[in-house]
Amino acid sequence: MLTSKLLKDAAREWGVDLIGIGSVDRWDSAPVENDPRTIMPNAKSVICIGFRIHRGSHRGIEEGTYFSSYTMTGFADLNNIIAPNAQRRVASFVEDYGFEAATVMYHANRFGGGKYNTGRAALNADGTEKPRPDILFNFRIGAALCGVGQIGLNRLLLTPEFGPSQRVYFVITDAPLEPDPIVESPICDGCLECVRKCPAKALSAKEPDDVDVTGVVNIRRCSLDTGKCSIGHYGGISPFAPEEVLAYSKNIVDGSATTCADGSPRPTDDEIVSYLRENVQYTKSAYDFTYGPAVVCAACIRSCLAHLDKTGRLEKKRV
Ligand code: SF4
Ligand code: SF4
């Protein structure tokens, strides 16, 4: 008989650092396009597996001397190699017991030219439209619903084991597995180091963006200016940015959501990303052999990790 313990013991053998299981009713209040049952209508459980991002892969960025390790081993390799291998083994294990297992990848729903929900809608039996493909559920909230961790004010998944430093992936199944409890003890203490250290001024505690998952968990989050975050994310204020790119980025970072610091209208998020992809060699190169996002910033991860370590809020010291 397939049990949660059997699956978890096997997954640990395959190199999975974190594993948690949520019963699918925890998504009852989710919008239909974020509900795992929109993918598998008879789903009963969602399995979340996670892999640590090594503490050392942030080190060179903190020193300002070496950025590739996080880009490759903490991001691309996890998404492209490590996670798909383990995720496949989890899915095979579940299907060998006679259940069905649908893998939900980091790359899911990105095949439509980098935009979400671009396909033609399928129809329900009554003729109404289903959500347009590809749909996806929120990974960070999904991990919280699987009992793997909590969402911090920095909007990241925080786990007792690794703080903000991991990536997660999912398998949806009709197997009725025993769910894990929601992590109740607070990990984020509201220190706001993440807000202070964000070099793009993208996080705002003054404008909260909370999520209430009815009957399951209340999530408190800062709001995120996605355009400003793209400046950090795509290298616009990194050591790899030429002077004119730094000036372009500063004009946006010091401006508002609609206006640059010099009074000109702010470029759209797409325009910001295209400009940086074209003009920051590091970002361009990363795209050439993997993909570029999150290559050179992640101060919201690093500052939080340092704070949680310093204040002893993780199960194990990670510095
Ligand atoms: S990735 Fe960088 S720019 Fe975006 S919120 Fe985190 S620290 Fe700020
Ligand atoms: S840096 Fe502080 S406020 Fe921000 S998520 Fe971490 S613990 Fe919470």
Image (cartoon, rainbow, N blue to C red):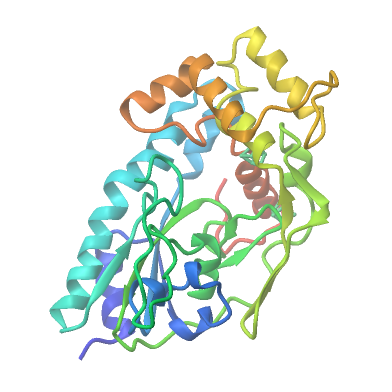
Write the residue at 56% across / 20% down. Answer: 275
Q: Residue furthest bottom?
A: 1
Quarter of the render that holds ligand 2: bottom right
Q: Quadrant of the C terminus?
A: top right
State whether residue 210 is above or below residue 200: below
Could you tell me if residue 185 is visible in this image? no
Write the residue at 78% across / 34% down. Answer: 258
Write the residue at 54% across / 33% down. Answer: 59
Could you tell me if residue 44 is visible in this image? yes
Q: Is residue 59 left or right of residue 171?
A: right
In terms of image quadrants, where is residue 171?
bottom left
Q: Residue furthest front?
A: 127
Q: Is residue 3 left or right of residue 278?
A: left
| Front residue (pair 163, 270) | 270
Residue 270 percent across, percent down from the top left:
57, 32
| Front residue (pair 95, 179) | 95
In terms of image quadrants, where is residue 172?
bottom left
State whether residue 261 is above or below residue 24: above
Residue 230 percent across, percent down from the top left:
61, 34
Q: Residue furthest top?
A: 243
Q: How many marks?
A: 0
Residue 263 percent across, percent down from the top left:
85, 21
Q: Quadrant of the N terminus?
A: bottom left
Write the residue at 28% across / 69% down. Answer: 102
Residue 233 percent across, percent down from the top left:
57, 33
